[in-house]
Amino acid sequence: MTRDQLQAKLNTLDGRDYRHYQSLTGEYDFTDFRLVIERIPKDPFAPPLSGLYRVSIPLPDTAIEQPMIDSPSAAIACRDFFARQFYRQSQRIAGQRRGTGHSGIIAIDQPGQAILQRSSVVIQHNQLEVRFFIGLPATGRNIDAALAIKMLLDELPLIVSQALQRAHTDVALLQLHIHTALDAQYLRHRLPALGLLAFIADGSILPRASSSSDQPLASGTVIPFQSPDSLSVQVTLPFAGEVSGMGIAAGITLLAGGGFHGKSTLLQALQMGVYDHIPGDGRERCVALSETVKIKAYSGRQVIKTDISPFINNLPLQRDTQAFSSNNASGSTSQAASIIEAIEMGARVLLMDEDTCATNFMIRDRVMQQLVKKEDEPLTAYIDKVRQLYRQKNISTILALGGAGDYLEVADRVIQMRRYQAFDVTLRAREIVHKYPSMRIKEDQDTAIQPALRCPDASSIDPMNEYQKPRLHSPDVQLLQFGRHKVDLQDLEQLIELAQNRAIAYAMLYARRYMQTGTSLPQVIDQVMSDIQDHGLDILSEQLSAHLAEFRSFELAFTLNRLPCLRINTDNISSPY
Ligand code: ADP
Ligand code: MG
């Protein structure tokens, strides 16, 4: 159908009931692009997720050139760029509600500070395709045809041309977007060869605008990051050329310092270093190994058959800690479980902030060792495990702290944050330890940390709500409604976008096909991730979706671990590791 036919059709709908909009589903040829109206919500209040509109324009009409999409990583960054262009233009041109419910808005999922694979923009069949939502306008339930015509025939073409067409694309910005992602990935891949876990470039802007915003801090004086000389590393990036910055080597690293001097800010930049950031973010060249996991204590969380015995043993009343389950874990238990789950999924670096750790999990000082004998203390504090983890499993720890000085004894290096500046105080810390030894008794440093295999049971993953209808709903980045179950993800700080949360919900359902007797959680997740890598995010849901973004294998596993209905089998299966 042509755009004129669309207009004629809309004219016949004026004033009629909203459900008559359904007759618009179909394909329309505009001169410069093609519009497919895939799904139209049944009423003007239905959430934007329930509608789906697609426009596609031929690649030669865009500023995209072959080298920009030759590698999968470049193509992902390219798509991410156009998602942002479309977001900006649709906000500007049709961002306001005009009428009942969502009437009058043209909207695409809002991208955050990370460059991610997104289902809202795809490149296929030599076309750039954008998936979005149109709130077809109504007053009450009565169709407003005049406004619908304006939206579909004037505003949409304007958005498409401003956001996607070559003439309106700043090629330098597009290139910068792609190069920024490729440089960050190059840097991340170089880390092992440099013997590093993470790299923070000089000049980086680490602090964020607020605790609820991931935008760079812009108000007041912002101190750019500067590496101490002793930790400075130079790397030559493919596009940005030589950069220098602070390298954090493998082992145990403390980020020490007084309160409000920038420890947590640095740690947060490290935990976000698993993602590539957009130009202007301030953390474009702050990277960490992809296998970096932030660990927190989160009392009240669910734990399913997790072997926390390396940390917690001999509980009163003989509770089993080799396959420990709880739907209300304590601070220390939750932290132990999170560490074991991270190890299970192949974490190489654990990040912890003293502020959000359980004190009794982290330390047991000399004085307490005198009062409470080891045989009366089920916990083995992390301070007695941190070196073993590194020695036996090559898992490094980076720990931000201001109080637990006993850790100086077990650290390989100590970085002190003073007025937002980093200083290498390792030598001084050694002198202090020599002068004031903690005289702690080292406790249990040897119980092997070898979690048993946990095999998720597909039949337990139930997406049905109380009316026996499948329901997946993501009200918030850190909350998922999965069937009848609320999945609390508040402690997963590396889950950063609602679209990731949604994709994980689908991925949990999708993963069921790989959950067979004897298939461990990491094996299941590996297969899901490899399917996404091969076929894109569309593979996750039967219905085409415009609202998914890529996520890490870790966050998928951690979400499953928090799914209330999940059953895990821990039968004796010979370990492949
Ligand atoms: P700590 O963990 O050491 O107590 P934070 O990292 O929480 O300190 O930082 C304290 C405050 O200082 C935060 O509000 C943060 O935004 C701000 N801040 C951190 N780094 C910088 C910086 N480089 N420049 C300006 N302000 C900063
Ligand atoms: Mg702090």
Image (cartoon, rainbow, N blue to C red):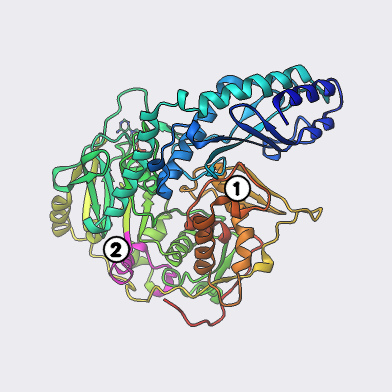
- Element carrying mark 1: helix
Cα distance between the residues tagged 2 and 1: 47 Å
Q: Nearer the viewer, residue 385 or 283?
A: 283
**Mark 2 surroundings within 10 Å by alpha-carbon count, few (fewer than 14), some (14 through 19), many (20 or more):** some
Q: Nearer the viewer, residue 317 or 259?
A: 259
Q: Which residues are magenta?
A: 375-396
Which quadrant would residue 390 be assigned to in this image? bottom left
Q: In the figure, residue 561 lies in which quadrant?
A: bottom right
Examine the rendered structure and indicate whether residue 158 appears above or below residue 576: above
Q: Is 150 situated left or right of 363 in this image?
A: right
Residue designated by label 2: 366
Q: Position of residue 169 (x, y in %)?
A: 44, 26
Kind of residue sitting beneath label 1: Arg
> Among all residues in the image, which is located at the extreme right?
16
Residue 563 visible in the picture: no
Q: Is residue 469 left or right of residue 208?
A: right
Q: Residue visible at 38% across and 54% down? A: 290
Left or right placement of residue 470 versus residue 416 in this view: right
Residue 120 lies in the magenta-colored region: no
- Tell me where residue 226 appears, x and y as whole percent: 21, 37
**SS at mark 2 in the image:** helix
Q: Is residue 384 magenta?
A: yes
* Residue 452 seen in render: yes
Residue underneath mark 1: 502
Residue nearest the observer in this picture, 525 or 264: 525
Mark 1, Cα crowd under 10 Å, few <14 / some 14-19 / many 20+, is: many
Tell which of 320 and 111 is nearer to you: 111
